[in-house]
Each structure stands twice: as structure tokens, then as C-alpha cells.
Amino acid sequence: DRGQDLPPAQPFRNYVAQARLGLTPAQHEAYFREQLGDVDEPTLPYGLSDVQGDGSQVGEAHLALPDSLSQALRTQARRLGVSVASLCHLAYAQLLGRVSGREDVV
């Protein structure tokens, strides 16, 4: 079980409180350097590390969620005590891990 290797989860309110403390840019940078210092490369889906051009040919897709799914996400987020954004970030990280074949997603 990989969960045993993780540090205890911190409540989201701790992150909000830290963000509201008015830290300097240098303090923010030091925090993220500490958290991400061992990351050698970003997690890229489908092996897309060699992108050519300026990105102007990149397409976007937008899909509105059905109201029932939006409500289910809000209900689940409330139940877990997190934001809907946190659930979406988790879902994206899970997807990215699967399509990249990596367990540690950044």
C-alpha cells in the first residue's frame, strides 16, 4: 500500500492560512524548492517531451459537465472537506500518472 509511505495529509485550511500570511516571493520560492527539489523533469503525458514549434498549433477542448455530475462533485468535496478544485487536481494527477506510466506526478 503506497499510502503508508506518504506523510499525513494536511487540511486544506492550513494551505489557505499559509497563503494569507503574506509571505515574500523569496519565502514562496524557498518553500517550493524544498517541496520540489528532487524533481528532475515534469510529468508529460504520452511521452510528449519533444514538442516542436511555438505552441500555436495546440488545440483546446472544452466540455461542460452535466449538472448532476457537478452536484456530485460538490457533494463529495463537501463530504471530504476539500474544494472541488482539489478533487479535479487529484483526478488529473491520477490520469496523468496512468498515461505517463509514472507514480510520482508533478
Image (tube, rainbow, N blue to C red):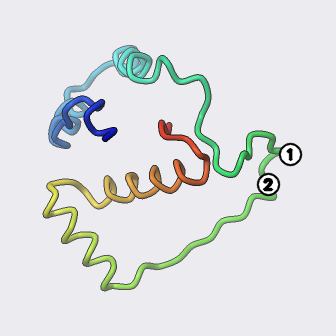
In depth, the one of 26 and 82 nearer the eye is 82
Q: Residues within 10 Å of mark 1 (few under 14, many from 20)?
A: few
- Horizontal side of 84 relative to 104 (left or right) equals left
Residue 61: percent from the left, percent from the top? 62, 70
Q: Which residue is drawn at 75% across and 58% down?
A: 58
Inspect the image, locate mark 2, and give the three-letter code of the amino acid beneath it. Ser
Q: How far apart are marks 1 and 2 (CA)?
A: 8 Å
Residue 76: percent from the left, percent from the top? 21, 67
Residue 41: percent from the left, percent from the top? 61, 29
Task: Read off the residue under disc 1.
Answer: 53
Rendering quarter of residue 75: bottom left
Q: Which residue is drawn at 39% across and 85% down?
A: 66
Q: Residues within 10 Å of mark 2 (few under 14, many from 20)?
A: few
Task: Read off the residue under disc 2.
Answer: 56
When the figure is inspected, residue 29 is found, relative to residue 57, above or below; the finding is above
Residue 98: percent from the left, percent from the top? 54, 53
As helix, strand or loop, the secondary structure at mark 1 comes to loop
